[in-house]
Image (tube, helix red, strand yellow):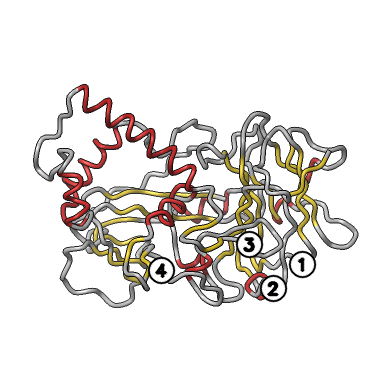
Amino acid sequence: MGESSLVTSGMQDPIRVRGKFLILPPEYRGAVPKGYFVYRSATNNVFIFLRGFYENPKDLTPAVAHLELTKVYPLNGEAGAQPMKFPDASGVPVNMLPISDGSAFDHLKQLVDKEGDNLASPDWLGMLAAIGIVKGQQFSPDAKTQAIFNAAAQTGYKTSRVIGFQQTLSNSSLLIYTDRHWINPMDNATPPTPATAQNLDFINTAGKFLALDARIWFFTNYYSISPGMLSKVPGKGAAYMIGFTDGTGEPLSGDHSYRLNLPPNIPAANFWSLTLYDADSASGLANGQPFPSLGSRDKPAQNPDGSTDLYLAPKAPDGKASNWLATVPGKGFFAILRLYGPTEPAIDRSWKPGDIEKVN
């Protein structure tokens, strides 16, 4: 799987992506050319995420070549646009975790300066102003205040990790099945199974309030959201199932060995995958394998009945290496099962995976 992303800082004019998509900044009031998929950004800073799926895990060249066709440039500025750069980050260590120290407040100041009223409501901007973060004004906390900011950021990060493992939000269960431990925090935002009145902006449309815990939950474990992640159209988008616990409700631990049974005819029109994540950081689990994921394109062995057993353990069971994901002793983890292009049995829940079961 190839991925590419970029952030445009302080966007004031429209930008085009690969000639087909037009991104408009908040203040733009000009004409919109025909023939574009238009996205109106609520902010000047824009993060663009592209993903290229491979057919063969041993040959990523086609996916990479497809992504390298991407061009991003100002509207009507193609002629003078600088050549795109595509750094190869494979095997290069990088810390992309959320900020968990006082420098988070410095980043907030940068956003306030760049975004102004686009960033938040007057109430939220007022809360920032109360601690000295105001657009155009100097922000220089003294040593005592900086120590308080550090403690606050660390507490906030740890609190988000606790919220991010909850299985209920606003008194609503996040469980997908009544007899399994798989959960999905956003499945209730779209039919046919709405559990709350929450929308994709994390607004409770019934109570007209921001569902703070729901938003914290989601962006603790993910960093982006799109309607495709919630698609109920057979064969389109993706279906997500998150496993934090085993079949007894105990948190998953790298000290134990587990087996996950996927019944026959896994309902994914494109492909499916299981990925392991570090419980402490929600980053891909650093387990010594090239990728902490395994899926249909890896061609794991099937059982005689057509089902698939996946093994999550520190060591591969004898003869099961093709169906094994390594775990790390002493580290908690969680798993996400993704069905790309979920078909009707996934949507109506007539197909359901087994729980992640502890084995000897």
Q: Residue furthest top?
A: 143
Which of the two discs, 3 and 4, labels the residue nearer the N terminus? 4
Q: Position of residue 71 (x, y in %)?
A: 36, 56
Q: Position of residue 132 (x, y in %)?
A: 15, 38
Residue 339, disc: 3
Kind of residue indicated by mark 1: Asn
The residue carrying mark 4 is 199
Discs 1/2, front: 2
Marks 2/4: CA–CA distance: 24 Å
Marks 3/4: CA–CA distance: 22 Å
Discs 4/1, front: 4
Is residue 314 positioned above or below 8 on the image? above
Kind of residue indicated by mark 4: Asn
Kind of residue indicated by mark 3: Leu
Which of the two discs, 1 and 3, labels the residue nearer the N terminus? 1
Mark 1 lies on a secondary structure that is loop
Discs 3/2, front: 2
Which of the two discs, 3 and 2, labels the residue nearer the N terminus? 3
Q: Residues within 10 Å of mark 1 (few under 14, many from 20)?
A: few
The residue at 76%/53% (across/down) is: 299
The residue at 15%/29% (across/down) is: 140
The residue carrying mark 2 is 345
Q: In terms of depth relative to the viewer, which is nearer, 29 or 74?
A: 29
Which of the two discs, 1 and 2, labels the residue nearer the N terminus? 1
Which of the two discs, 2 and 4, labels the residue nearer the N terminus? 4
Kind of residue indicated by mark 2: Pro
Discs 3/4, front: 4
